[in-house]
């Protein structure tokens, strides 16, 4: 005898299916602004801002800077030097603020226009190139050198990655009778560039040794890959250890070569925001480069930076807010999507969009798969609980700071509930 009739069985299955389907249904993610963003929204309005604007929270910026400072200072005996990654903080005022907060005048620069700008505007800077520039760009720098008093022969380290590049720079140095400091890029596992092995390094050492105008100033080994490696079976830990060992091997080789120098006088640079906390000065490197962590874009949401706070937001005005109506011709799709997902019932059209950024506040907004992105007036969908009105601001978190921070004109600096000043940004330039 069956305990459940066929009909009863089908009914029960149907109920289970409906219950399961309902359980799969996305829950409403929407909510009004949290108090922090309600206040920021008001502050931007009070400041008369009505266009997409990059906002930096000064207090949060300083909190991050203090964490970096505390790490490099270690136990107070100055374990590591700090170098600011210029391209990730693309504003002189922003760089000044952090340089002062952390007590460094070292910067890593990645392109000719910013090199020209920095050497002219901040002649006290100590500069290391973060990528090897084509010799034509180097020649261009010397053709119009800064008139600020910046002394390139002392304060600037060019980056060299191959024997060919050393030869090119040597020819330039000879032609202009110009002393040039060269820092050697080493490949510690990323394979983006740099010296791959000791044989190549030996050739470069010989070339530098033979040319008195070229002065070896240190090493640069960037290990951006290690923190991207999945933490499976010790793989990440292995790549971290490998990068440090390779660095050590290159450094030992140099210190056994005719170019050897007091370690204190050398720039032995490594790391970036995701990895600087893995270094404490006990390894071969005596300096770390940090940029993005100061403002913590979302790509830097990693365990090693979990106590850092996001300090930069894109704020953009709402142009139109209302029930989501899919475009003519696909109304049914819109209706079905709204039925299924409460977070697709309300539309918010913003001023601009399609940035390297994710909607952040108020909660529960996301781009529409149906409509797609727009750089002019992007649609974001939500449940409506955000309660946004035209001229309110939507806040997005940049995924990275490089190239994004300078897309909006002057940066609005927010502190104590007010926009207190505007910081000009570097021109967008490769
Ligand atoms: C050579 C080098 N060092 C360090 C960094 C780290 O920069 P950030 O701290 O902004 O991640 C970069 C970033 O591209 C780099 O190219």
Image (spheres, rainbow, N blue to C red):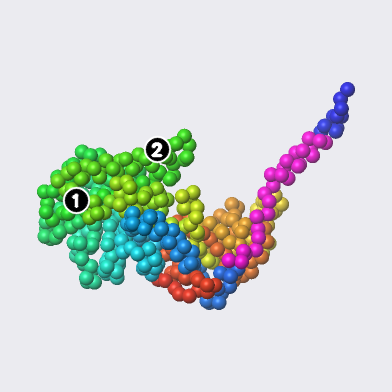
Q: CA distance from mark 1 to mark 2?
A: 30 Å
User: How far from the left and from the top, in percent, is residue 264?
Assistant: 24, 54
Give the class, few, some or many, for how many residues have Cα within 10 Å of label 2's Cα (few <14, many ≥20). Answer: few
In this view, the residue in front, 280 or 144, is 280
Q: Look at 55% across and 77% down and name the residue there.
A: 46
Task: Say left or right for 1 vs 41.
Answer: right
| Residue extent of the magenta highlight | 11-36
Secondary structure under tag 1 reads loop
Q: Look at 78% across and 35% down and name the residue there.
A: 13
Image disc number at residue 71: none
Task: Say left or right for 351 vs 246.
Answer: right
Judge whether 235 appears above or below 87 on screen.
above
| Cβ at disc 2 under 8 Å from ligand 1 | no
Query: Which image quadrant: the N terminus?
Result: top right
Image disc number at residue 238: 2
Task: Say left or right for 28 vs 103.
Answer: right
Q: How many marks?
A: 2
**Magenta-span inclusion, residue 308:** no
Residue at the farthest top position? 1
In this view, the residue in front, 97 or 48, is 97
Q: Which residue is mark 1?
A: 261
User: How far from the left and from the top, in percent, is residue 86?
Assistant: 35, 61
Give the class, few, some or many, for how many residues have Cα within 10 Å of label 1's Cα (few <14, many ≥20). Answer: some
Q: Nearer the viewer, mark 1 or mark 2?
A: 1
Q: Is residue 307 visible?
A: yes
Secondary structure under tag 2 reads helix
User: How far from the left and from the top, in percent, is residue 67?
Assistant: 44, 58
């Amino acid at each position: 005898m069956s305990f459940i009739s066929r009909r009863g069985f089908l009914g029960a299955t149907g109920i289970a299916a409906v219950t399961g389907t309902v359980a799969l249904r996305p829950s409403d993610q929407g909510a009004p602004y949290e108090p922090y963003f309600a206040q920021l929204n008001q502050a931007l309005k009070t400041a008369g801002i009505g266009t997409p604007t990059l906002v930096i929270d000064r207090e949060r910026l300083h909190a991050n800077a203090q964490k970096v400072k505390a790490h490099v200072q270690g136990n107070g005996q100055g374990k590591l030097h700090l170098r600011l990654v210029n391209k990730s903080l693309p504003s002189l005022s922003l760089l000044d603020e952090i340089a002062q907060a952390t007590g460094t005048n070292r910067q890593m620069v990645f392109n000719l226009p910013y090199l020209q700008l920095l050497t002219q505007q901040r002649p006290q800077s100590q500069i290391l190139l973060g990528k090897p520039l084509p010799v034509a760009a180097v020649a261009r720098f010397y053709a119009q050198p800064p008139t600020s008093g910046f002394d390139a022969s002392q304060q600037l380290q060019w980056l060299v990655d191959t024997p060919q590049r050393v030869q090119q720079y040597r020819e330039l140095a000879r032609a202009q009778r110009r002393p040039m400091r060269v820092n050697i890029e080493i490949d510690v596992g990323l394979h983006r560039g740099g010296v791959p092995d000791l044989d190549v390094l030996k050739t470069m050492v010989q070339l530098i040794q033979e040319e008195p105008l070229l002065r070896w100033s240190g090493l640069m080994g960037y290990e951006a890959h290690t923190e991207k490696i999945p933490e499976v079976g010790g793989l990440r830990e292995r790549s971290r250890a490998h990068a440090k060992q390779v660095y050590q091997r290159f450094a030992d080789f140099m210190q056994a070569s005719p170019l050897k120098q007091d370690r204190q006088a050398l720039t032995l640079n490594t790391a970036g925001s995701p990895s600087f906390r893995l270094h404490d000065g006990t390894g071969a490197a005596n300096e770390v480069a940090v940029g993005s962590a100061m403002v913590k874009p979302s790509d830097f949401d990693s365990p090693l930076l979990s106590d850092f706070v996001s300090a930069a937001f894109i704020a953009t005005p709402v142009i139109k807010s209302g029930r989501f109506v899919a475009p003519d011709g696909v109304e049914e799709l819109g209706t079905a999507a709204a039925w299924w997902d409460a977070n697709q019932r309300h539309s918010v059209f913003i001023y601009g969009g399609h940035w390297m950024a994710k909607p952040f506040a108020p909660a529960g907004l996301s781009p529409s798969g149906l409509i797609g992105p727009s750089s002019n007036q992007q649609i974001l969908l939500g449940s409506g609980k955000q309660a946004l009105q035209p001229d309110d601001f939507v806040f997005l978190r940049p995924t990275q700071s490089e190239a994004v921070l300078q897309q909006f004109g002057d940066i609005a600096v927010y502190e104590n509930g007010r926009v207190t000043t505007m910081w000009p940004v570097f021109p967008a330039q490769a």
